[in-house]
């Protein structure tokens, strides 16, 4: 678990200066939100690895991290109820969609799914037909990660950072996308050897930015969850039938 915590802290060390630089105002309230952001991310990082680090928390057998993702969902829901007072204005935990955004949100949702299918089909290495893999990709990654990244974490940043910056747009969405890319592309081995997959970082950071844009436009995490799970499922399926 030490490696997991160290990884999380390394990501935060990279992003924290930008969070402080891009604050609306350097007030005590905003610094508390950034502190909560860091705490929540470290706790979440530990939660999703519980089943792999401690046998007692391994509740579902399989080739995928079912247990960890379930703990991730529970952690996200718990963090939402504990800390939602810090991002009331950007509470996207609702089924209700913002008015007048259905068409662009649907276009973005379908577009990112199609891009995922094309990317995984042409750039993926292929794979054998596996029902467990398809079931996992259809259900858990989007649910777990969107609750935490576009729900809790982005809610905290949107409440603390500027809403728009020249050339980069919404800095909260960009920083969450970068963090999302780090989580998927950066690895730290037990021997403290660093690995980084640049292509996977670009792919996941871009997808994360689109999911974030959908969340901000719709003011809900419903479509980001749908887009994320659809991208994973149909992308994986395309790789299997390649």
Image (tube, rainbow, N blue to C red):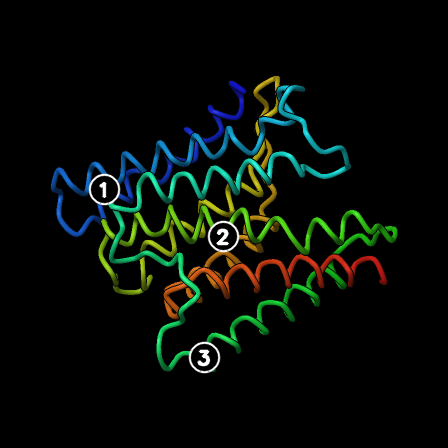
Quarter of the image with the C terminus is bottom right
What x and y, as percent, mark residue 230? 64, 63
The answer to whether 163 is drawn above or below residue 10 in the figure is below
Label pair 3/2, CB-CB below 8 angstroms: no
> Nearest the camera: 200 or 107?
107
**N-term mark: 2 or 1:** 1
> Nearest the camera: 24 or 36?
36
**N-term mark: 1 or 3:** 1
- Residue 146's label in the rendered image is 2
What x and y, as percent, mark residue 225? 54, 59
What x and y, as percent, mark residue 119? 68, 63
Name the element at disc 2: helix
State the residue lying farthest toward the right.
128
What x and y, as percent, mark residue 196? 58, 38
The answer to whether 239 is drawn above or below residue 44 in the figure is below
**N-term mark: 3 or 2:** 3
> 94 left or right of 137?
left
Residue underneath mark 1? 20
Name the element at disc 1: helix
Residue underneath mark 3? 102
> Nearest the camera: 110 or 120?
110
Please give the name of the residue rendered at 76% of the width and 54% of the height, measured from the top-left corner: 134
């Amino acid at each position: 678990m030490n490696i997991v915590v160290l990884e999380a802290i390394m990501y935060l060390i990279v992003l924290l200066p930008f969070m402080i630089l891009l604050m609306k105002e350097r007030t005590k309230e905003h610094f508390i939100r950034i502190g909560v952001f860091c705490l929540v991310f470290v706790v979440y990082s530990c939660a999703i690895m519980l089943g792999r680090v401690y046998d007692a928390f391994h509740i579902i057998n399989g080739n995928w991290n079912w247990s960890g993702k379930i703990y991730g969902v529970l952690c996200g829901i718990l963090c939402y109820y504990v800390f939602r007072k810090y991002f009331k204005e950007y509470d996207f935990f609702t089924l209700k969609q913002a008015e007048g955004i259905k068409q662009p949100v649907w276009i973005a949702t379908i577009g990112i799914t199609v891009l995922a299918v094309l990317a995984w089909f042409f750039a993926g290495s292929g794979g054998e037909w596996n029902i467990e893999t398809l079931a996992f990709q259809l259900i858990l990654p989007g649910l777990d990660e969107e609750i935490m990244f576009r729900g809790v974490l982005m809610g905290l940043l949107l409440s603390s950072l500027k809403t728009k910056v020249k050339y980069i747009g919404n800095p909260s969405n960009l920083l969450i996308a970068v963090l999302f890319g780090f989580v998927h592309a950066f690895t730290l081995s037990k021997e403290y050897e660093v690995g980084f997959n640049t292509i996977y970082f670009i792919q996941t950071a871009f997808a994360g930015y689109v999911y974030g844009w959908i969340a901000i436009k719709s003011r809900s995490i419903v479509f980001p969850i749908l887009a994320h799970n659809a991208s994973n499922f149909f992308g994986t399926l395309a790789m299997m039938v390649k």
